[in-house]
Amino acid sequence: MAIRVIGTSPLLMHRWTTKSIIQMVGTAVGQKQPRGPKDLTDEYEQSYHRNLNGKVAMPCRIMKAAIIDGAIATDGAVTKADLKRSLRVVGHTAPIVTKKPMEMDCRIASNNGSPDMRARAVIPTGYHFDIVVQFTSPLTPDKVVAAFDGAGSCIGICEMRPEKGGEYGTFSIEILDNNQIARILKENSVPEEEYKIPPEFLRAFTMGDVKSDKVAKAMAVASHVNGQARGKKTSKHTEVEA
């Protein structure tokens, strides 16, 4: 099934940066790294998700997580377990098409109880991106659409979404013709931009010296993203179409 995701509110993006991962892991393994002066412009430029081609894109893994959580708004029509097992968002990243240029959002946030300035990339309302979903029994098209609708209105994607008490990241969907599938699969076959992490930090993490849940989560994301980039750059579906 080919689906177009259309933003009904601004999209506030935030991704783990290489610098933040190195700082957290370094602290956890006794190799604390200097934070350096804050650069809000650089923080903004590093905050948005992108693929290996440098294009602003939505990771397919984020969309699947949102759809799974959308089950809570279907009145029992579909369960999280069914979506997790039987639904797949095909590909790595979906390029985001915007009507208006991306903006920088600067605001005061709490950092371990202390006020701090932070900058994020904001994509104005009206953006869209296309994805392809595959599913097997017990899922049906109406159940998948119900989960999408729940995700778009009650869960959202990225930062300050409804699931977290915010108002950003809501979306609606449009079902596309099946003749769009080949195009979408090709566009979405590009992996996320790879993280460049020094080997000494990876060795420390592998040895089990990292005990922080936050650090472990950051490293898991980095490992997943880098695994995409080191694998095939195209899915088998794209190769068939070629």
Image: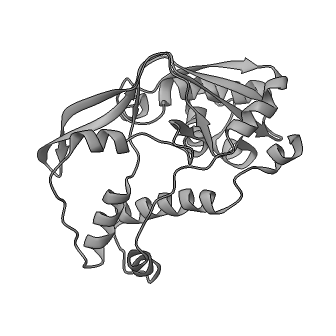
Residue 31 occupies quadrant: bottom left
Residue 67 in view: no
**Residue 217 against residue 235 in the figure, above or below:** below
Residue 151: where, in percent of width, then height? Answer: 55, 29
Residue beneath the point at 44% across and 84% down: 207
Q: Nearer the viewer, residue 176 or 191?
A: 191
Residue beneath the point at 75% across and 27% down: 2
Residue 107 occupies quadrant: top left
Q: Nearer the viewer, residue 75 or 116?
A: 116
**Residue 130 against residue 87 in the figure, above or below:** above
Q: Nearer the viewer, residue 183 or 58?
A: 183
Coloration of the structure image: one colour
Residue 109 in view: yes
With 114 as the anchor, is 87 left or right in this view?
A: right
Residue beneath the point at 41% across and 59% down: 218
Residue 142: where, in percent of width, then height? Answer: 76, 24
Residue 47: where, in percent of width, then height? Answer: 37, 42
With 196 as the anchor, is 92 left or right in this view?
A: right
Residue that sits furthest to the front in the current view: 53
Q: How many numbered discs?
A: 0
Q: Nearer the viewer, residue 118 or 54?
A: 54
